[in-house]
Amino acid sequence: MVTRAPLTPGKVSRTLVGAVLLSILVISCGGGEKATQKKLAQIAVWEDQAWTANGKLLSFLSDRNEKVRERAALAVGRVNDTLAIDSLRRVLLEDPSPRVRAMAAFAFGIWQWPHGKAALLEAVTKEKDPEALVAILQSLARVYARDEYQSYIHLLRHPDPRVRLQTAQTLDVVNRRDAADSVLPLLDEPDVTVRRGAIYSLVRGQSRKAAEWALAHVSEPDPVTRALIYRLVGSYRLPSTSATLVAGFNDPDPLVRIACADALMIARDTATVSRVLTRLTSDTHPGVVTRLARAVGEHWYPPATPVLQTLLSHPDPGVRVQATLVLCNQRGLVCGDLIAPAAADPDPRVRLAFLEALDKAQRFTTLDTTIVFPMLRRLCSDSLPQVRARAVQSYVGFGGPAWDVYLNRLFHDSDPQASAKAVSLIGSMHLVGYVDSLHALFRKYRDDPNPDLKWAILAAGTNLLPSVRIDSVRQDFLNWGMADPNRLVRWYTIAVAFKFRQDLRNGLGVYQTGLTVDNIDSLLPRYASPPLARLETTKGPITIRLNPDWAPRTMRQFVAIARAGLYDHAPIGDCQPGTMIQLGDRRGDGGDFPPANVRDEYSPLRVEAGSVLWLSPTRDTGRGAFALALARLPYQDWRYAVFGQVVEGMDNARALTTADSVSSVTISTPES
C-alpha cells in the first residue's frame, strides 16, 4: 500500500497557480494560432488584390511569427511594390530567421528590381546560412549581377554543395565565360547533382579545358550525365569533336542522341551534319528526329532538303512541324510548293507551322503566289479559330486579292480570340474606318472577364487615333477600360491615356477579386494532405501531387478544369524531348479554358524533373495550359508557378511525344 503525503495549504496554492498558468498558456497558444491564420489570410487577400494596402502589408514583415514574416515577404515580391525595397532590405540583412531572409531575397529576384542589387550584394558577403545563400545567389542571377561576380565567385568553394551548385549556375546565367575555368573543379564532385549542374553551366562557357574533360568522359554510365557531357563536347570545337558526336548518335539511350543533336547545333559543323543525315530517316525515336531536323536546319545545308521533305509524311506531328519550319530555312529555294503538304495536314499544329514558315520564307526567297494564295484562302476558313486567324494575318501581309473581305469576316468571327487578331491587324494597318465597329465590339465584350480582346481594342484605338484630342468615342474607351475589373486592362488603359496626355494612374486601384478574409477557407481551402491528379495518357498513367501551399489559386483552377473534363482528349502540345512537354490545351489557343486568368504565384520552388508548371504567356495570364519538366531546368526557376510534382509515372512522361494525348484527368482529395 502506497501512502501519500497530506496536501498542505502551500502545496494546494502552488498547484492551483500551476493549473491556472497552464490553462492560460493553452488558451494563448490556441488564440495565437488563430491570430496567425487570420494574418495569413489577410496577407493572401492583399496579395490577391496586388497591393500593399497603403503599407499595412509591410507591417507584417516585423511580425513576431516567423510564418507570417515569411509569407509577407513573398506577398511583397508578388505584388511588386518598389516602395517596399527598404523594408525588404532590412529583413534580408537583419531578420533572425534564415527562411525569412531567403524569402526576402526571393522577393527581390521575382521582378528583377535593379535597386535591390546593392542589398543582395551586401547580403551575400554577410550571410552564413546555406539556404538563404542559395536564394541570394538565385536573385543575383535574376538582377544580372554580371560585373559584380567577384563578390560571390569564392562561394564555388563553399562547404555546402547546394551553394557551390547555385554559384556555378549564377555565373552561367550572367554569362561570365571568363569564370568558366573556376567551375572546373566541380566536374569531379562526388555529389551527382552538383556534378550535373556544373556540366550544364559550362555548356555556354566555351572552355577548352571543359571540352577536353568532356571528351574523356563520354563513356559515363549514367545516361542523364552522359547526355550533358555530349552537350559539353559541342561547346568547343576540337579535332576529335566531330567523330565523338557521330559516335554519340549510336548511343542506345534516346536522351543521349537528343543531346548529340543539341551539341551539333552548338558546334555549327556542316561536315558532321553530312555524316549524320541518314539518322533522320533511320532513327525510330520522334524526339531524336525532331531535334536533329532542327540542328540540320540551323546549318542551311541544301543537300538535306530531299531528306527533310520525306519527314512531312512522318507519323509523328511534332516531326512534321519541325520539318515544315526547317524547310523554309533552306536559302535560295522557292519553298511555297516545297512545304505545301503541311497546309493540308490533319493536325492543326502542322498547319500553323506552315503559316509561320511562309512568313519566314517571304523574307529571303521568292514565293509563287499562284500556289500560295489558294492555300491561304482555304486556311482562312479553317475549323480552328487560331488557324484561320493566323491565315488571315498571312493573307493580309502578302497583300492577297480581296484581303479586306477576309479581314472583315475575321473581325465578325464568333470566336473572341479570332476577333482579337483582326482587331490587332486593324490597329497596325491604321484602318480608321473601323473606329465605330471597334466601339461597338468593346461594348459587346465590356463585361467579359477575358482581357485579350479588350487589350486588342485599346491598342487598336491607340494606333487609329493619333490625335491628342479626345472625343466622346475615345473617352468611352478610356472610361470603360478604367472601369474594367481586370487590373491589367486598367494598366493598359493608363498607357493609352498617356498618349492623349491624360494621367489616370490614381484610378488604378486594386484587383476586384472575390477573395476576402471571411471566404478564404472555402475558396482556398487547407488540405490535410496534398490532393493528387492522375493523368491517363496513351503512354500510361502519370500521378501528380498538387501543391496547395505555394500555389493555391493555380491548383484551384487546375482542379476545376480537370473536374469539368476540359483536359480530356487533349493532345500533347510543344514537346522538347528530355526537357519539357506542354499539356492541357485541346485547341491550341486556350479557348476551352475558363475566361478568368490566374495571378502568377511565383515561389522559391525549383524546376526539377517532374515539376508541374502553370504556363502564362505574359504576366498574370495563365488559364489552364501546363507543362511537365523532364529534367532540372534552372533557367525556368521563378518564371512559372510550380503547382505540383510527379510522384508516379515519370517514365511514361518522358516517353510522350506530340503524337500522344491525355485521355482524362481525375482529382482525388483527402475529402473525396
Image (tube, helix red, strand yellow):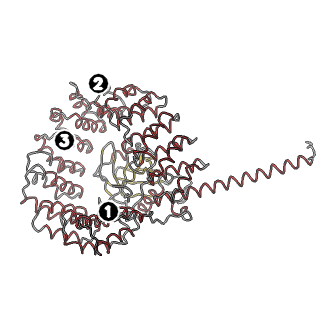
Mark with earlier residue (2, 3): 2
Q: Amino acid at mark 2?
A: Glu
Q: Secondary structure at mark 1?
A: helix
Count neighbours of disc 1 (C-alpha within 10 A) and say few if under 14, some if 14 to 19, many if 20 or more: few
Q: Is residue 366 left or right of residue 91?
A: left
Question: Is the N terminus in the top left, top right, bottom left or bottom right quadrant?
Answer: top right
Residue 351 horizontal/vertical position (percent): 20, 57
Count neighbours of disc 3 (C-alpha within 10 A) and say few if under 14, some if 14 to 19, many if 20 or more: some
Q: Amino acid at mark 1?
A: Phe
The alpha-carbon separation of the residues under discs 2 and 3 comes to 25 Å
Query: Residue 235 sits in which quadrant?
Result: top left
Query: Residue 557 sits in which quadrant?
Result: bottom left
The alpha-carbon separation of the residues under discs 2 and 1 comes to 57 Å
- Report which residue position mark 3 lands on: 298
The answer to whether one can see residue 186 in this image is: yes
Residue 344 horizontal/vertical position (percent): 16, 59
Q: How many marks?
A: 3
Q: Nearer the viewer, mark 3 or mark 1?
A: 1
Q: Nearer the viewer, mark 2 or mark 1?
A: 1
- Report which residue position mark 1 lands on: 498
**In the figure, 435 relative to 274: above or below?**
below
Q: Secondary structure at mark 2?
A: helix
The alpha-carbon separation of the residues under discs 3 and 1 comes to 43 Å
The answer to whether one can see residue 649 in this image is: no
Q: Amino acid at mark 3?
A: Glu
Between 93 and 301, the residue placed more toward the observer is 93
